[in-house]
């Protein structure tokens, strides 16, 4: 194996790892890995276009996507502090549906009780 082939392989594997890490933070780890394998360094640019994190129904800010929320999602929006509750998605193919450990879920804002 020549020296240039070794560098190309190293860059390609680094791209796979980078795409996986970015994809994991954006809610699409397997897609990130696949883009890294198939597209190499170009996959790093492509995965930045994909964001599957759930959206707050009040302010439309991106919610934190983490393994800690596998059983129901975050309880409040980090941007507007709206309290959230999660319900099962009627349409699992909806753009708003997020897959947690208990199936596709959609965030709803809880009604406020301001007097």
Image: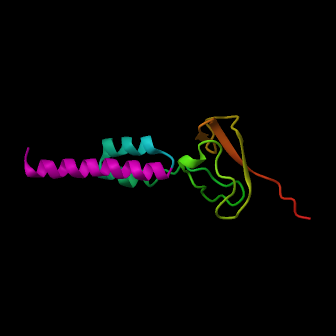
Is residue 7 found left or right of 90 in the rendered image? left
Toward the viewer: 59 or 13? 13
Is residue 63 found left or right of 31 in the rendered image? right
Q: Residue furthest left?
A: 2
Q: What type of secondary structure mainly makes up the magenta span?
A: helix
**Residue 65 placed where, x, y %?**
56, 51
Which image quadrant for residue 82?
Answer: bottom right
Residue drawn 92% across the image and 65% down it: 115
**Residue 109 placed where, x, y %?**
75, 53
Is residue 25 found left or right of 3 in the rendered image? right
The quarter of the rendered structure image containing the N terminus is top left
Q: For the magenta stretch, what is the residue range?
A: 1-26
Residue drawn 70% across the image and 34% down it: 90
Toward the viewer: 96 or 66? 66
Q: Residue furthest right?
A: 115
Q: How many numbered discs?
A: 0
Which image quadrant for residue 98?
Answer: top right
């Amino acid at each position: 194996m020549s020296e240039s082939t070794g560098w190309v392989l190293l860059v390609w594997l680094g791209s796979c790892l980078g795409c996986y890490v970015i994809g994991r933070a954006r809610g699409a780890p397997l897609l990130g890995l696949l883009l890294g394998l198939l597209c190499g360094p170009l996959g790093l640019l492509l995965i930045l276009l994909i964001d599957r994190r759930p959206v707050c129904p009040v302010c439309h800010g991106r919610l934190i996507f983490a393994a800690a929320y596998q059983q129901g999602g975050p309880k409040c929006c980090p941007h507007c502090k709206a309290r959230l509750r999660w319900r099962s998605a009627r349409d699992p193919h909806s753009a708003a549906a997020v897959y947690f450990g208990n199936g596709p879920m959609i965030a709803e804002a809880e009604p406020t009780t301001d007097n």
